[in-house]
Image (tube, helix red, strand yellow):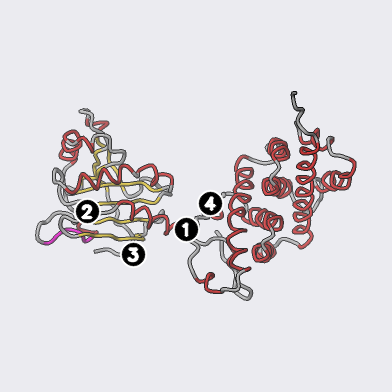
Amino acid sequence: MLGVGEKFPSYSLTATVGIERDPSTAFKTITDLEYSGKWKVYFFWPKDFTFVCPTEIAGFGKLNKQFLERDAQLLGGSIDSEWVHHAWRNNHPDLKNLPFPMLADIKRELCGQLGILDPASGVAQRATFIVDPDGVIQFVYVTAGAVGRNPEEVLRVLDALQSDELCPCNWHKGEPTLQVA
Amino acid sequence: MSLEELMETLPAYARDLKLNFSSLKQQPDLNEQQTWGTIVAATIASRNAELTQSVLAEAATHLSGPALEAAKGAAAIMGMNNVYYRFLHLTSNANYKTIPARLRMNVIRTHGIDPVDFELWCAAVSAINGCAACVDSHEKVVRDKGMSEEAVLAAIRLAAVIHGLATVLDAESVRAPQPVSV
């Protein structure tokens, strides 16, 4: 599995971004270059239409505004196709108004490169990655089986990652000054 | 009220401040952005509503949008940092310095204008808010970035005068009690 400090892989995937019938607006191609300058929070789940996942996904959805305020884009994903995502979102009340895209990694290439394909089941593990604006992974969080994730914890970590002491106020006599870009 | 009109309302006892401000606005050591950014940041740090309103209106004619935002940002972030880091340096418990601050201060990186100007405004606000460590470190940063001592002092003079003006305006607003209807 890729870890902190490694570059998030390049990808180009169809994503489900709406629940309307028109595929030209409900689907969108998203690549790793989208949302340039922003942090990205990718979280994957094993299968659409199962039980733990909607709670987590809706949980992230409720925090979407707080992620956006921190210049972070949420992106969900599984190895299901964009049509399965579409059907699931239409089917489940908690997912109807999801404010962020669901990536369809149907060829399993992204999950494969991330190293999160479960060897037994062949589907994605419950993995979350926080990626900085330079495309570097800064946090990896994976849970086994049916243990759901805590989206608030992910937000807390993002906050901590973004709380650099950029002020030279903590400079001590004799130390070189901070290089502020 | 425009800044000019507001300056005309100053009482006689504040004549020195009025004249200092008028000459400092035109001093040659700082460029227009540095001068007016200092004025904005110092005004916000000095906490007088009337002065803030007039200065912000006037400063908008001297500063670009981003520069004005950045000057406000400097006053905002130093409003926080001057308290936090002053505590760290006032307390004799050195352990606090080793514990992460966990305070967001991304504006210091993302303000988008000349970094030396932003640091100068931070230094000016720190002078007003009285954080010795902040004053020290920001002064060092701007000098390392090539600013002259004369230029630094010009900014501090401006901040000092602005602060004086704010206290006068506070006093003057108290002196005239509201009429009480009987």
Name the subunit of mark 2. A
For marks 3 and 1, give the CA distance: 17 Å
Asked which secondary structure carries label 2, the reply is loop
Q: CA distance from mark 2 to mark 4?
A: 35 Å
List the residue tagged with mark 4: B110
Q: Residue at the location (68% across, 37% down)?
A: B60
Given the image, on which type of amino acid does mark 2 rest? Gly
Bounds of the magenta segment:
A115-119
Q: Which mark is residue A163?
A: 1
Letter of the chain that mark 3 sits on in the rendering: A
Residue type at mark 1?
A: Ser
Amino acid carrying mark 4 in the image: Thr
Q: Using the image, name the chain to which the residue with label 1 belongs.
A: A
- Asked whether the residues under marks 3 and 4 belong to the same chain, the reply is no
B84 vs A66, nearest the viewer = B84
> Looking at the figure, which quarter contains the N terminus of chain A?
bottom left
User: Farthest residue toward the top?
Assistant: B182
Label disc, if present, on residue A4 of the rendered structure: 3
Q: Are marks 2 and 4 on the same chain?
A: no
